Amino acid sequence: MFDELTLLHAAHTPRCIATVNKVFTYHTIQLMTRGQVELFYDDHQTLMKGQWFWPCFPGPHIRFHESPKGKPWEHRYIAFTGPQVTRWQAAGILPTQPMQLDDDVLATLVKRYDQMLEKMNQPGRWGHAQAVNLLESILLEVAQLQSTTQPNPPVWLSKVLKHLSQLEMEPDYNAIAASLHLSLTTLRRHFRHATGTTLHQYRLDLLITEARRKLGSTDLPIKQIADELGYQDIYYFTRQFTQSVGISPGRFRRSRQS
């Protein structure tokens, strides 16, 4: 799980007056401990005062800012991406709506947020692992509170994710769709609506995550890693890896060994 989630950035701003106005390409969870914020998912408005938790995710146009303008609020957040996000969605623990918090829950979440920020900034693999573990504990805490109002995740999504996670074989998307009594077009549309990403992109994220793991923890030649992940052309593997990670497989391996 730890290698399948990338923690992008995070912060604690005691006096925040920033405005967010964008369509997200990644996920975040936001926490306000005091102040007032106006939040929009597309045209749906929520005025939040005091102690609130809310997510940002791909799909809607999301806006939020202090209210009234110029009056700061206390802000914590973390941004993340990777295949593990889709698994959390399938498990039903990734929130989709804002939630007001009582004092006890707020105290728990603030403590975990601050521990998570500290671990995130620690060098080495174990700080990252501990930060991911704390992030999941925050999501589980909130999911438990929302369990009476949120529907169970669809069974079909769990089945699709299981097929796509079999990295040793190329997925037959038509066969997966047929097993669910759907057309491929319908499956693609449902998958994107449920996860915010495409079948192909999710599969590619899994492959690149596994490539990163093998490059960082084994001495296998890069060509062998590409072969084990189903790439017949090492140059195509190198191009896809570089586009996804920002550096070549060789450079990535050297950065993990330094």
Image (cartoon, helix red, strand yellow):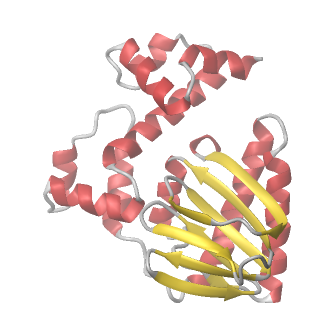
With 31 as the anchor, is 86 left or right in this view? Answer: left
Q: Return the residue nearer the eye: 52 or 175.
A: 52
Q: Residue at x 82, y 44 (%)?
A: 121
| Direction front: furthest residue | 70
Camera sees residue 77: yes
Quarter where residue 185 is shown:
bottom left
Measuring from the top left, give residue 172's x and y in whole percent. Answer: 21, 41
Q: Return the residue nearer the eye: 184 or 164.
A: 184
Measuring from the top left, give residue 41's x and y in whole percent. Answer: 49, 75
With 217 as the anchor, is 94 left or right in this view? Answer: left
Measuring from the top left, give residue 54's x and y in whole percent. Answer: 62, 74
Q: Residue at x 55, y 28 (%)?
A: 246
With 116 as the anchor, is 90 left or right in this view? Answer: left
> In this picture, is 54 found above or below 200?
below
Camera sees residue 218: no
Q: Return the residue nearer the eye: 75 or 112.
A: 75
Quarter where residue 252 is shown:
top right
User: Could you tell me how many numbered marks the image carries?
Assistant: 0
Measuring from the top left, give residue 13's x and y in whole percent. Answer: 82, 63
Rendered-image quadrant of the C terminus = top right
> In this picture, is 189 found above or below 54?
above
Q: Return the residue nearer the eye: 241 or 42.
A: 42
Quarter where residue 191 is shown:
bottom left
Q: Residue at x 56, y 49 (%)?
A: 81
Q: Residue at x 61, y 52 (%)?
A: 80
